[in-house]
Amino acid sequence: MQSINPFTGKVIASYNDHTPEDVGLILHKMNQGFQQWRSVDFEKKASLLDDLGNLLLKQKDQLAALITQEMGKPIKESISEIEKCAWLCRHHVTHDALGISPQSIQTEAKYSGVQFEPIGIIFAIMPWNFPFWQVFRFAVPNIMAGNVALLKHAPNVSGCSLKIEALFREAGFPEDVFRSIILDASFAEDVIAHKHVKGVTITGSARAGRSVAAAAGRQLKKVVLELGGSDPLIVFEDADLQDCCTCAVNSRMLNAGQVCIAAKRFLVHESIFESFTNQLREAYESLLLGDPAQDFTQIGPMARPDLCDEIERQVDESVSMGAKILAGGKRWEENDAFYMPTLLVNVSRNMPVYKEETFGPVAVVIPFSTKEEALNLANDTVYGLGASVWTTNEATARWMVDRLEAGAVFVNSTTKSDPRLPFGGTKQSGFGRELSPFGVREFLNLKTVWFQ
């Protein structure tokens, strides 16, 4: 495995894969570790988690630099990612955040209720686009609930993967509570099938999700899938255009557009279509591309060359079918690892930029005339991760919220993940949830208890 700096194209480091024997030994030790960890009192776990959060903040500059070096995220965004991980740690140092205290349920029994119990090793297959946040978001709640976590990260962020394991150790967590393995994806099914693995979670493409879900299904193991998205941002005629435009640009251009829950299809009322599109174009053309290690850089390179190739294909094919480029539409002349911020109009349903997930700095703007048309356009996708609605009319907002096919709907705000709220999607965006008590319980045994 090699980690390659996408900005310079130079190899950062090479890593040896874990062998099947290595993985088997790790799983054996983690299973033993789980038997001890599940009995550790919550106050001790909370103290360790507090130390982990403090380590993240203490080392945030070095950790952010590692993210930027391995996958090209602008350094300011990398620092924000580390700070968000620290926030998640601080949030989960209380029982209430986990929502796993036993609950009584009134019946004719002397006592009846539910208690929440950990199940063992949770195996996570994580992507490169948020190499720390994606891992912490799955690992911290599960570990605090008594499970233990095994990570197979994306190969291009192997340095981040191993550093996260080192941080858990440095914070004082037992060695086998969190482990990271360097493993080719072709061996993931063997790990899923291992008797000590009790649950599986993946964040990735729909194709990868189908493969993992099938493998977990053959073993009758619980799986959580957080997959792609093609989120609509719906702008009504009474919206605050300046605020909406700023949020639309920030949402789509974060991490060079490599965000599953980013707004990707801008649906705009026909009465404000021209003015809104002009604001977007001006904002796109003002964004600064460059060295992601520099504070002033707003758009970094794509994380891998093949990702840039795919965005280029989607745009070129759509243009050949009639889409019109208002901004960008090509690689950056100074470094072809970058794709320029791109805005497309005159887009139809059969084009790749409409029907496929665009995982890069590309957005389409589509007009609508009625709320019914906006709803049909918004739901006209195989995905259902998030959506945002922009209007000052609360009745309109509520009407849209109740009918949008999405795991989350944000009104007058861009979609985002938050430790206090469940995160996940519907349709081909996956199933199951992360974060909040709803997410924590995905990998717990909900045990019914009855005393006669």
Image: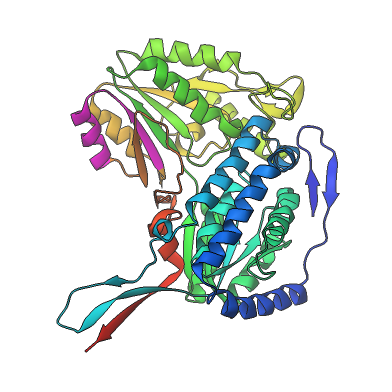
In front of the other: 402 or 267: 402
Query: Residue at 46% of width from left, 55% of height from top?
Result: 434
In the rendered image, the residue lying farthest to the left is: 108
Instruction: Please provide percent x and percent y for residue 415.
Output: 42, 37
Choose between 197 and 95: the one closer to the eye.
Answer: 95
Q: Is residue 155 visible?
A: no
Displayed quadrant of residue 373:
top left
Magenta-drawn stretch contains 388: yes
Q: How is the image coloured?
A: rainbow
Q: Is residue 220 left or right of residue 181?
A: left
Taking depth in this image into account, of 21 and 217 the one nearest to the observer is: 21
Residue at x-position 53% and y-position 70%: 147
Q: Is residue 148 above or below residue 49?
A: below
Left or right: 11, with 179 as reference point: right
Q: Position of residue 392 (x, y in %)?
A: 26, 23
Instruction: Residue at the far bottom: name it.
Output: 452
Which residues fall within the magenta stretch?
A: 386-403
Tally the marks: 0
Q: Quadrant of the C terminus?
A: bottom left
Residue 65: x, y in percent?
A: 74, 38
Give the side of residue 451 with respect to residue 87, left or right: left
- Horizontal and vertical percent for residue 368? 30, 23
Q: Measured along the vertical axis of the image, is residue 293 above or below residue 176?
A: above
Q: Is residue 225 visible?
A: yes
Q: Residue at x 29, y 13 (%)?
A: 271
x 18%, y 30%: residue? 395
Quadrant placement of the N terminus? bottom right
Foreground residue among 250 and 339: 250
